[in-house]
Structures are given as C-alpha cells and as structure tokens.
Amino acid sequence: MAAPPYDEDDRMLAAVDPEATEQLSLEDLQDAWSLLVPEDRVESFRALNRPDAEDLFLFLSSHDQAELLFSIPANERRAWFRLLAPDDAADLIQEVDPEQREILLGLLDEQTRRDVVALLAYAEDDAGGLMNPRYARVRPDITIDEAITYLRRQAAERTESLPYAYVLDQDQKLRGVVSYRELFTARTGQRVAEVMATDVVSVPEAMDQEEVSQLFTTTRLLAIPVVDAQGRMKGIVTLDDVVDVVREEATEDIQKIGGTAVLEAPYLQVTPIEMIRKRGGWLAVLFVGETLTAAAMGYFQLEIAKAVALALFIPLVISSGGNSGGQATTLVIRAMALGEVRLRDWWRVVHREFFSGLGLGGILALLGFLQVVTMHRVSGAYGPHYLALGATLALSLVGVVLWGTMVGSMLPFLLRRMNFDPATASAPFVATLVDVTGLMIYFTAARLLLTGTLL
C-alpha cells in the first residue's frame, strides 16, 4: 500500500521547517502552534483562507492572540481584534504591556470600548472579569410575540451564543429567565412574566472564578448571570468561559503541587531565566528543609555507628513517609478543588486517613520485614539480631506512613483556614516536612527494640 501523502512525520517536519509551514491545514496548525517560532506562526496564519484564519485566531489563547496581533501589520489588526467578544478582548488586553493597551482600545467601536474598559475594572479572577456584558434581555410586561421579535433583532446584532433570555425590570434588576423553547411554545397573547422562571441562579461580581466553575458543575447551566449588590444584571458567564477557567486553575494547581511557582506562559514560551526563577525559590526552600534531615541524622550518629545496618534503611523509611504524604495531600487538594471536601469536613478526612495510613503502613511493614528476613536468609547480611532489626523497620514504617498520611491530609486544611491556596502544600514540601519526623520515628523505634542487642 502506498504511503499517505501527508503523515505524522510530514506534520512534525512542517512544524519546524519554515519552507513547509504553508502545507499545514487548520487542524495541523492548531496542533503545531506551540512548536513554531513567531515568524513561522505569522507566515502560516497569513497563508490560511479567511474562515480558517478566523477559526485559528479564536482558538488561540489570549497570550498567543496578543503576540500574533502585534506581529501582523498595524492596518490589519482592527479586523482581527473586533472578532473577539468584549470579555475575550479584555482578556487579551490584560496580556499586553500598558502602552499597548491604548493601541488596542483604539481599535474598538465606542460601545465595545466602554464594555471592555468596564470589564478591565474587575479583578481578573472574579466573575465580573470573566463575564460577557452582552446578553439577551426582555421586559416582563411585553407579549411573547414582542419578545421573539425583539430577541430576533438582538441575535442579528450579535454573533455570540445567547442560550437564555433574561428578564429585567426598568431598573435593570434581574427578575427571571426564560429559554427560547419556552418562548416558542407559549400561547399567543401570553406575557413574558407568565412563562419566565423566577428562581434564577446568579453570582455576585466578586465571586472567585473557581467557585463559579463549581457552580456550573452542580447546576449544568449553559450560562449564569452576574449581578451587582443591588441585584442589577451586569453580564453573563458562559460555559465556554468556564472551560478555560477550569483548565487554567487545574494547570496552576498541578504546577504548585509539583513544587514550582505558577508559569505565566505556555511551557515552551517561558525563557530559561524565568524558568530558573520560578523553580529556584521552591528548590532553595526544600534544600533548607532537607538540612534539618542532615541535622537529625547527626543527632542519631551514635546509634548509626553502633548499628550500621540502621543506615541502610533510612532512604526506605523516609521515602515511604514522603510518598504516603504526597498521595494524601494530592487527593485532598483535588477534592477541595472539585468542591467534594470543605473546611468543615476536616474531621471526616482525619478519620479516613488515619485508618488508611494504618492499612498502608501495615502493608509496607510486612513487605519490609519480609525483605529483611529474606536477605538475611540469602546472605546473612544482618547478623543474629535480624528479627529485631526487621521488627524495628516494620514498626517504623507503620509510624512514618501513618504520620505522613496525616500531615499530607491536614496541611491543605490548615492552609485553606489561613486563606492560602491549598495547592501550596506540594508533594515535595510534604515529603521534606515528613523526612525529619520520619527519622525521629525510625530511631525512636530502634531505641525501643534494639537497646541491649544492636544498641
């Protein structure tokens, strides 16, 4: 069978070879975008037909849109920037330098400029900064036919999705919501107030975007209205906006859990200097923490000198505590992010993790004891008191794993209680914290079980 005219190897070649970028389709260019240098991005973008170029521009992140916009000729920027809804335009403007913001605002029509400036006044992570100020609205006292005619005119003026029509009074206060299905199935002569739903789910302007995303998960709505303190409607947050929020929040949490500061740009676009700055601080903190482990080993150096075999199991013991703590903190942080666990649930988590820690510690204790016995039977490496040594390792593993599990599960609650991001309780941080206490547990067990024999 003949090879296809354009396979995966060709795609990757096109991604790195300037001569080949014109061959990329819209889908291929979307996949390869992060691999292209700025010059090749512009060349590939300008080679697309207009509909595909519009789809690509709307597909890109705000950061990439801003970079592309200032890479094309100035006389072409207006047409591309005006493709964006006000909330997306505000997101793009927040990605550029202050002196460039006025240039972009000058590309907008007067009404859109007012909408964007109003959005920029909100914090980026608030519902107000996430919302679209353009939405379908009707009055409660008009007839169904009048509402449909009015909404048809609104839809013609807007390209955005209008999933619901919101019912506002003369003071712009939110009174209800009506779906298009309800409008089209209503009887002729009925008024909007007769078919609208009054139990409307809404969010305040200052609600954090992560809480907004959780509300979408529980309500399954396509859009949620944003209201001010007086109940006046300011805009809507749509499901499309929340998808981006969820991805952004998950990315930040994963980076923090991994023990690094949040990256402000895609991985391949972060400079080496910036990468060192983002990761170096955490590594320095962890390094200082590990010096406490060295100090703890120095405190127990007499025990190590008397029973050298104890030193062989130090990495095993402390890594088991760190691993169990990392598991617990990752599970609890994710449960908090999904809204499955709240501050008031801390005691339930303690109860669950206590028994989980005992069970996990028991499994590792059995494996550790069998490893000591097996290695002694094979090589005689641990001397006549190998059973006591195995028991010491087993008891230590139960204590260290239990302790690591408890610390890992409770640290996110402590941070949340102090109004810090629970994701800051990264797995490396928990492991470092557990290392020192793990050594103390290990050598305390050795003193209890080995005094008079090896010690």
Image (cartoon, rainbow, N blue to C red):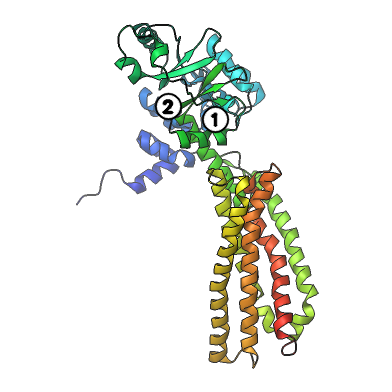
Q: Position of residue 212 (x, y in %)?
A: 54, 32
At 61% from the left edge and 42% from the top edge, which residue is drawn?
263
Q: Residues within 10 Å of mark 2 (few under 14, many from 20)?
A: few
* Amino acid type shown at disc 1: Glu
Of residues 334 and 53, the one nearer the viewer is 334
Q: Position of residue 449 (x, y in %)?
A: 70, 83
Q: Is residue 287 left or right of residue 71?
A: right
Q: Residues within 10 Å of mark 1 (few under 14, many from 20)?
A: some
Can residue 157 be seen?
no
Q: Would you name the residue on which mark 1 appears?
A: 67
Q: Is residue 12 left or right of residue 321?
A: left
Can residue 375 be seen?
yes
Of residues 124 and 173, the one nearer the viewer is 173
Q: Looking at the image, is mark 2 or mark 1 nearer the viewer?
A: 1
Q: Would you name the residue on which mark 2 appears?
A: 46
The picture quadrant where one finds residue 319 is bottom right
Specify the quadrant that holds the C terminus.
Answer: bottom right
Q: Are marks 2 and 1 in contact (CB under 8 Å)?
A: no
Compared to residue 244, the image places residue 192 above or below, namely above
Compared to residue 12, the image places residue 167 above or below, namely above
At 73% from the left edge and 54% from the top edge, which residue is drawn?
285
At 46% from the left edge and 26% from the top edge, which residue is drawn?
223
At 44% from the left edge and 31% from the top edge, which residue is drawn?
59
- Most distant residue in the left direction: 1
Cα gap from disc 2 to disc 1, whole angstroms = 14 Å
Label 2 vs 1, first from the N-terminus = 2
